[in-house]
Image (tube, grey):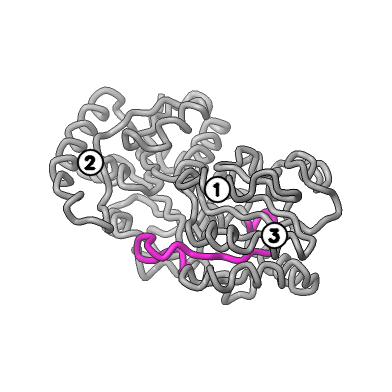
Amino acid sequence: MKRIIIAGGGTGGHIFPAVAIANAIKHTRPEIQILFVGAKGRMEMEKVPQAGYEIKGLDIAGFDRSSLIKNFALPYKLIKSFWQVRNIFKTFKPDAVIGVGGYSSFPVLKFAQAKGIYSFIHESNSFAGKSNMMLGKSATKVFVATDGMERFFPAAKLMVTGNPVRKNILNTTIGQPEALQHFGLEPGKKTILAVGGSLGARSINEALAEGLNRIIENDLQLIWQTGKTTAEKFMAVGKDRKGIWVDAFINEMEDAYMAADVVISRAGAMAVSELCVVKKPVIFVPYPLAAEDHQTVNAKHLADKRAALMIKDSDAKDQLVNKVIELAKNDTLQNDLKQNIGSLSVTDADQRIAKEILKTISE
């Protein structure tokens, strides 16, 4: 019986593809045992068990770019995590390890490579993270979302698969009127969806809070996910306003996508992949402090193909609301963006990745 560890997490952009890969593996080979490894206190410790998989937590943290003093304990945590990984491997005895990104994936893949165990990496962004670049040199295979990744990884190890997308988004059958009803909004009225990730995006939230009256005056509706950070402040601004749905988190993202005519979003790899699949006109506001500024690279990759619009985070307060109103009223531009972003969609990335892993470990 084969055993596989899937390591990583920290954000939905790492967790949801990891679960999609696990599901694809189990669909093909139900007898395979899968164990997740993540970081204690992070969202994978909640989301992975909800998806039906066991997870072990490591006492590890990532580098804090905002405060150097907060990184004082990092060497100790890294050493401790390697001991924890050693014990997990001793008990579980994996035949292969898959790293999906996030700092908890590093000690797991590094240990696997030192032991000669098959190691696979999924790099979801257009600009590879430093940990993945270091691990990629010794990896069995590196799965990437886009072409041109030879600048980060050995060309012989690369396989372009795209990013796995959640099945509920791929398989939704709900129509726009029904989706709008879910959010208490009017059918037939142009609707904006604003999402800044699970923690929220301050620049997007502040721009919307300031421009809310202009959105309403232009006869537009808004589905606004504020994120958990400062949620109460921004929920208070939009609460009880006609044509405005506001909450900290959207559980049914497939309904939100279907309800929307245009979208405002951060440019994490998962958001980009989902928006390609649902073919929505989008304005990306990349998070400027993401590692290696990869969100800007992700957004620019689409903007250069005329598949999306992009506004810098620093310009959001002055430009975002005007730009989204303009887009919502321009059907020609919306149709062009839909066609171009839809041409970039990949719907079977999880199956491609699972097939390659299973073929390798069965040889």
Reading the image, the residue beneath label 2 is 111
Dot 3: within a 10 Å radius of its alpha carbon, few (fewer than 14), some, or many (20 or more) residues? many
Mark before the other along the chain sequence, 2 or 3: 2
In the foreground, 101 or 185 = 185
The answer for how far apart the CA atoms under marks 1 and 2 are is 25 Å
Q: Where is residue 360 in the image (x, y as percent from the top left)?
A: 42, 43
Q: Position of residue 179 (x, y in %)?
A: 77, 43
Q: Which amino acid does label 2 sit on?
A: Phe
Quarter of the image where one finds residue 44: top left
For label 2, the SS is helix
Dot 1: within a 10 Å radius of its alpha carbon, few (fewer than 14), some, or many (20 or more) residues? many
* Residue 300, label in figure: none
Mark 1 vs 2: CB contact within 8 A = no
Instruction: Assign the C terminus to one quadrant of the image.
Output: top left
Q: Which residue is depicted at the point 83% across and 46% down?
A: 177
Reading the image, the residue beneath label 3 is 280
Q: Which residue is depicted at the point 67% across and 67% down?
A: 324
For label 1, the SS is loop
Residue 46 placement, left or right of 186: left
Residue 95 placement, left or right of 198: left
Instruction: Assign the N terminus to one quadrant of the image.
Output: top left
Q: Is residue 31 magenta?
A: no
Q: What residue type is labelled 1?
A: Pro
Q: Which residue is depicted at the point 63% across and 64% down?
A: 211
Q: Which is in the foreground here, disc 2 or disc 3? A: 3
